[in-house]
Image (spheres, grey):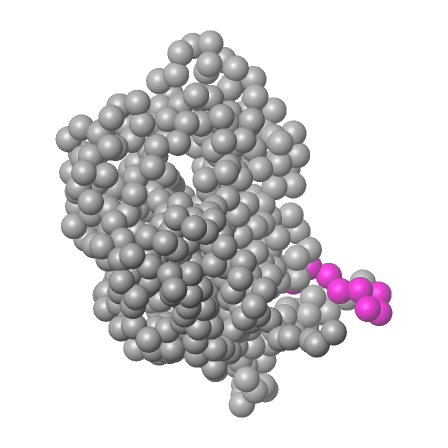
Amino acid sequence: NRERIMLNAGRGNPNWVAIVAREGFFEFGLFALEESQRARHRPGLGGVAQKEGITQRFKKFLAANSGKEGIAFLEDALNYVNEAMRIDGDDFLNEMVDAILGDHYPTPDRMLTICELIVHKYIEQEMLGSDPAIGSFDLFATEGGTAAMDYIFTTLAENKILHKGDKIALGTPIFTPYIEIPRLNDYELVELEVTQDENSDWQYPDSEIEKLADPAVKAFFLVNPSNPTSVAMQQKSLDSIAELIKTRRKDLIILTDDVYGTFVEGFKSLAAAVPHNTILVYSFSKYFGATGWRLGVIGVHEDNVFDKRIASLPAADREELHARYCTVELDPDHMKVIDRMVADSRLVALHHTAGLSTPQQVMMVFFALHCLIDKKGDYKRMAQDIVTSRFKALYAAVGIPHPENACDAHYYATIDIPALARGRYGDAFAEFLAKSYEPIDFVWRLAHEKSIVLMDGGGFDAPNMSVRVSLANLPDSAYDSIGQGISSLLEDYYNTWKGSKR
């Protein structure tokens, strides 16, 4: 059999790796080992690092290793933490050394104290437009964005904020598992689609946002920038939802997955527009090429509707929740919703071992510091340029102009095949294509005949027979081949149709 090379642009795993923060991480690990060996128990058995004098020893380590990759980053990181964040150097280094050695359970289990401060600063910069008026969020470090979603849905259900049979709105098109999760027996939620308009740069029309005014809709769940369409909400939409919540839906819950936000210049999350109603999920996986590290974070504002909802539950419900959490919290009635997520993440009973592994938290902090230090935004420009150049190459190879949209993350491209057929070969052929073939036929034949694997857009509630192309996971040159393959296959369909009319 003749072997063929498959071009799989189905998955969103990036094929770049952010180097600088990793260099710093591994060099810092060597420093931490030196610190541990200062209190050696036996040969090969170190002890717990000592805080006193740790900054001076670290500066000696930096000087002794000057010129090595990662050392300049560590020096800049310490200076930033000291000067910009006013965090004591000994406190910072002691927490980071103990964390990277991983010799204690995560304490606090929700997130290490200084780690939370630094990641919060990063979230402020990248998700909230650096607006201090928005206030502070409590953060929970999780095993990627997927674990974050698991914990959130569990806690909302266990704490009677969402009930089986409740109606929730989904911003569609959306990542397929997010369509599936609410339907599980665990939740049995009823889904209402709030649909982006393909002809308006994949924005939510006012008529769709108005669906959220229905008091039967308990929550609005979205990915922003969206997946598969890869477009962020415009400020106009953020303002519309903020006004709706302020005036008519003060109780509406917002759950937003903003993993692609850093690929859009000037991005702002719904958490910036409606901070008190929003649960923010962010993952470091895509931006830093770190899907294997499993680095995610949940953010809930210190003053939020969730805690108030729990406090106002009927007495019987509050008693039930008191019994659920009383083994892990002295005052369970006033336990914050985000701390309930931490407990629920370990089935409550195993709460004492909750929390993201501490070396993972250090890596998260180093990624965050890399961008906080980078005042010129050089890393952001490079990451954005990778996907944008592939986006343009794909559309050029298909043979159509690429969309111009300031809100586009360019992480994915969603190509509407019937619309492409209409523009290239006319209405009659486009109608034939839609009526004569199953929606998945195009992606099936693309894989079988052209060795190109794409995702079916219909599975994301995107238009039928659309395709989603990941612009993250293949070499630049592959996107010429993918674009040509799409165009060539469409021509094959056209020739079949033309032949049938003779």
Q: Residue at x 52, y 15 (%)?
A: 320
- Horizontal side of 240 relative to 448 (left or right) equals left
User: Given the current orientation, which residue lies at the most extreme top position?
Assistant: 316
The single residue placed furthest to the bottom in the displayed view is: 67
Quarter of the picture holding the N terminus: bottom right
Return the x and y of residue 226 as percentages of the image width and height. Answer: 36, 53
Residue 362 on image: x %, y %? 54, 61
Give x and y (percent) for residue 57.
58, 75
Residue 379 makes an appearance in the image:
no
What secondary structure is the magenta-colored segment mainly?
Answer: loop
- Which is nearer the eye, 498 or 361? 498
Considering depth in this image, is 297 or 74 the residue closer to the camera?
297
Residue 95 falls in image quadrant: bottom right
Answer with left or right where residue 204 lies relative to residue 323. Answer: left
Q: Nearer the viewer, residue 433 or 500?
A: 500
The picture quadrant where one finds residue 302 is: top left
Which residue reaches farthest front?
Answer: 502
Look at the image and say whether residue 44 sits in the magenta stretch.
Answer: yes
Is residue 398 shown left or right of residue 26?
left
Specify start and end residues of the magenta stretch as a single range.
42-50
Q: Return the x and y of residue 461 as percentages of the image width and height.
A: 40, 45
Q: Tell me which residue sits at (49%, 52%) in the image.
A: 440
Q: Is residue 489 above or below residue 376?
A: above
At a point 52% along the width and 65% down the height, the residue shown is: 446
Rendered residue at 18%/28% (across/down): 248
On screen, residue 274 above or below 499 = above
For the C terminus, give its image quadrant. Answer: bottom left
Residue 210 visible in rendering? yes
Number of marks in picture: 0
Q: Nearer the viewer, residue 214 or 497?
A: 497
Residue 40 vs 321, above or below: the answer is below
* Magenta region includes residue 448: no
